[in-house]
Image: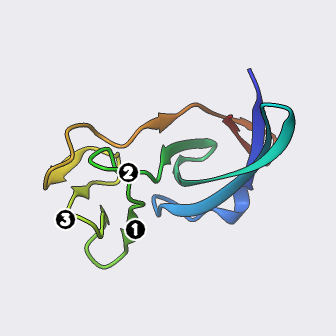
Amino acid sequence: VDWLAASSLHDLPDNEPTAVTLSMMRLDGYRQALERRTIFLVKTGESEVAAFDATCTHLGCHVAWDRQGQVFRCPCHGGVFDRTGAVKDGPPPEPLVKIATRVDGNRVMVQA
């Protein structure tokens, strides 16, 4: 299991989803390819962080956090998710995909 450092724990505001872009090298056939992936980190406790993939489960567009409405919104077909990733409205068939996290000291690690 590969773990990537995603953020400093102290950089995350309480209960406010924060977008982070992860970069990782993947072997693509015979060559290395840089893969970027956007996730949201949500500090849910003193040393607890939840992580969600930013990809909408409907057709793969990227969701954004709507701070005023306190929901994730998909710009493509009107999908809406709450801060726990659960579907609140629109066509998405599944909640946002959760990503395993752990906290090492001040570093938030996510499963690659």
Question: Disc 2 marks which amino acid?
Answer: Gly
| Mark 1 vs 2, N-terminal side | 2
Where does residue 35 sit, x and y in percent of width and height? Answer: 71, 49
Q: Which quarter shows the C terminus?
A: top right
- Disc marking residue 60: 2
The part of the image, by quadrant, that contains residue 18 is: bottom right
Where does residue 47 sit, x and y in percent of width and height? Answer: 64, 43
Mark 1 residue crowding within 10 angstroms, few (<14) / some (14–19) / many (20+) = many
Where does residue 72 sit, x and y in percent of width and height? Answer: 33, 62
Is 18 left or right of 82, judged from the image as shown?
right
- Disc marking residue 65: 1
**Label 2 to label 3, Cα distance in Å?**
13 Å
Q: Residue at x 53, y 44 (%)?
A: 51
The answer to whether residue 107 of the structure is visible from this angle is no
Please name which of the two marks, 3 or 1, marks the residue nearer to the observer: 3
Q: Residue extending furthest right?
A: 31
Where does residue 82 sit, x and y in percent of width and height? Answer: 27, 54
Is 30 left or right of 51, judged from the image as shown?
right
Whether pointer 1 and pointer 2 mark residues with C-beta atoms closer than 8 Å, the reply is no
Task: Give whichever of 21, 45 is nearer the camera.
Answer: 21
**Label 1 to label 2, Cα distance in Å?**
16 Å
According to the picture, the residue beneath numbered tag 3 turns out to be 78
